[in-house]
Image: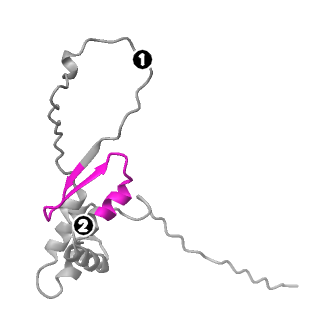
């Protein structure tokens, strides 16, 4: 007697993605360059986004950040630092002229002051141990950002 056997096989499609995973991080220079390329006429943002494999909404976001001052080359780079020694007071012997003394009890070190000249000309003097986030908030408020 003949039996009818029905065989069903499910076929699955698998997509293999190679390369680095996760989100890509763009430097401030790259962001500014792409925004600059997208300054053309109609469709420029979409064309630049396609050419560089970037979502067009990112370019619009970076453009807004540039207008607000949140994205700039100055914000992402180092600023020059000048060390200035204070002039010795009258009657104070310079350290090089002092005789060497035997080591004594440790002397408590005082925190040095850091002077930051803001873009609007204001000067901000803070202790060297200030938290970077606090310094950024102070500088933003005093600089009018």
Q: How crowded is the residue under tag 1: few (<14 C-alpha within 10 Å), some, or many (20+)? A: few
**What residue is pinned by disc 2?**
142
Please report the bounds of the magenta region as a residue range: 115-138
Inspect the magenta stretch and tell me whether residue 72 lies in it: no
Residue 135 located within the stretch drawn in magenta: yes
Q: Is residue 2 left or right of residue 31?
A: right
Q: How is the image coloured?
A: one colour
Q: Alpha-carbon neighbours of circle 2 within 10 Å: few (<14), some, or many (≥20)?
A: some
The C terminus: image quadrant: bottom left
Left or right of 110? Residue 115 is: left
What x and y, as percent, mark residue 5? 78, 82
Camera-nearest label, 2 or 1: 1
Say which label, 2 or 1, has the lower sequence index: 1
* Residue shown at 22% from the left, 21% from the top: 95
In depth, the one of 49 and 74 nearer the eye is: 74
Task: Establish if 65 lies above or below 100.
Answer: below
At which x and y percent is residue 70?
26, 70
In which quadrant is the N terminus drawn?
bottom right
Does residue 26 show up?
no
Residue furthest front in the image: 91
Disc number placed over residue 59 in the picture, else none? none
Please determine whether, in this image, residue 92 is positioned above or below residue 113: above
Give the labeled residue for mark 1.
Answer: 104
Q: Percent position (x, y) of residue 138?
A: 30, 63
Q: Can you name the residue that lies furthest to the right here?
A: 1
Q: Nearer the viewer, residue 100 or 30?
A: 100
Provide the secondary structure element on which disc 1 rests: loop
Query: In the figure, 59 relative to 104: above or below?
Result: below
Instruction: Name the residue at the left extreme.
Output: 40
């Amino acid at each position: 007697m003949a039996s009818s056997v029905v065989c069903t096989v499910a076929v699955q499609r698998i997509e293999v993605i190679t390369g680095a995973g996760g989100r890509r991080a763009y430097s401030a220079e790259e962001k500014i360059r792409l925004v600059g390329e997208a300054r053309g006429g109609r469709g420029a943002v979409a064309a630049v986004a396609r050419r560089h494999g970037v979502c067009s909404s990112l370019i619009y976001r970076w453009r807004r950040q540039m207008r607000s001052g949140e994205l700039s080359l100055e914000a992402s780079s180092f600023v020059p630092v000048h060390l200035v020694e204070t002039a010795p007071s009258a009657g104070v012997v310079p350290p090089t002229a002092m005789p060497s003394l035997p080591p004594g009890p440790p002397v408590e070190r005082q925190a040095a002051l850091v002077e930051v000249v803001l873009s609007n000309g204001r000067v901000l003097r803070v202790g060297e141990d200030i938290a970077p986030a606090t310094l950024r908030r102070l500088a933003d408020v005093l600089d009018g950002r």
